[in-house]
Image (tube, rainbow, N blue to C red):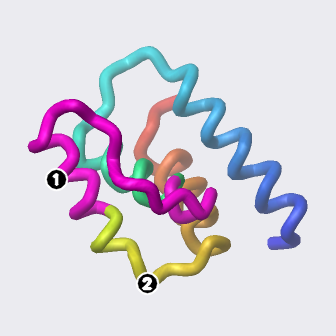
Amino acid sequence: MKDDKLRSDFTKAVEFVNNYTEPLPADLLLKLYAYYKIANKNFNNPGSETPLINAFKANALIQAKNITREDAMKSYITLVKKEIPR
C-alpha cells in the first residue's frame, strides 16, 4: 500500500471508529488503542484516572510493541473492516 493511501485509509478508519455509536468489545478497543498509539508514535502513558484501565492499555501497548508504524496502521484498518459492522 502506498504511504499516502495507507495514511488516508487509516484516517478514514479512525474517523469511522470515532463516529461509531454502538458499543464495541473491550478487547477490540484495546487493540485499536494500541495500533493507534503506535501508528501515531504516541508512547505517552495512558491517561485514564482508573488504574485498572491504565494497566489494560499499557498491556495492549506491550503486546503490540514490536510492530512498525505502517503495520500498526494496516492492522488498525483490517480490524475495523473485519470486526465493526457497517
Q: Residues within 10 Å of mark 1 (few under 14, many from 20)?
A: some
The relative height of residue 63 versus residue 27 in the rendered view (above or below) is: below
Instruction: Please tell me which residue lies in front, 48 or 80.
Output: 48
User: At x 78% / y 56%, what residue is drawn?
Assistant: 7
Instruction: Please tell me which residue lies in front, 17 or 67.
Output: 67
Let me know if residue 57 is in the magenta part: yes
Identify the secondary structure beneath mark 2: loop
Residue hosting label 1: 55
Q: Outermost residue toward the top? A: 21
Q: Outermost residue toward the bottom? A: 66
Kindly report which numbered mark, 2 or 1, lies closer to the viewer in this rendering. Answer: 1
Q: Residues within 10 Å of mark 2 (few under 14, many from 20)?
A: few
User: At x 89% / y 61%, what residue is drawn?
Assistant: 4
Amino acid marked by disc 1: Ala
Q: Quadrant of the N terminus?
A: bottom right
User: At x 15% / y 34%, what residue is drawn?
Assistant: 50
Instruction: Report which quarter residue 83 is drawn in.
Output: top left
Residue hosting label 2: 66
Counting from the top left corner in percent of width and height, residue 45 is at: 35, 54
User: At x 28% / y 61%, what residue is drawn?
Assistant: 60
The relative height of residue 75 versus residue 48 in the rendered view (above or below) is: below
The relative height of residue 70 versus residue 20 in the rendered view (above or below) is: below
Instruction: Report which quarter residue 84 is drawn in.
Output: top left
Q: Which mark is residue 41?
A: none
Q: Quadrant of the C terminus?
A: top right
The relative height of residue 19 versus residue 69 in the rendered view (above or below) is: above
The stretch of residues the image draws in magenta is 37-60
Q: Is 22 left, or right, of 76 in this rendering?
A: left
Counting from the top left corner in percent of width and height, residue 21 is at: 44, 15
Let me know if residue 65 is in the magenta part: no
Counting from the top left corner in percent of width and height, residue 68 is at: 58, 79
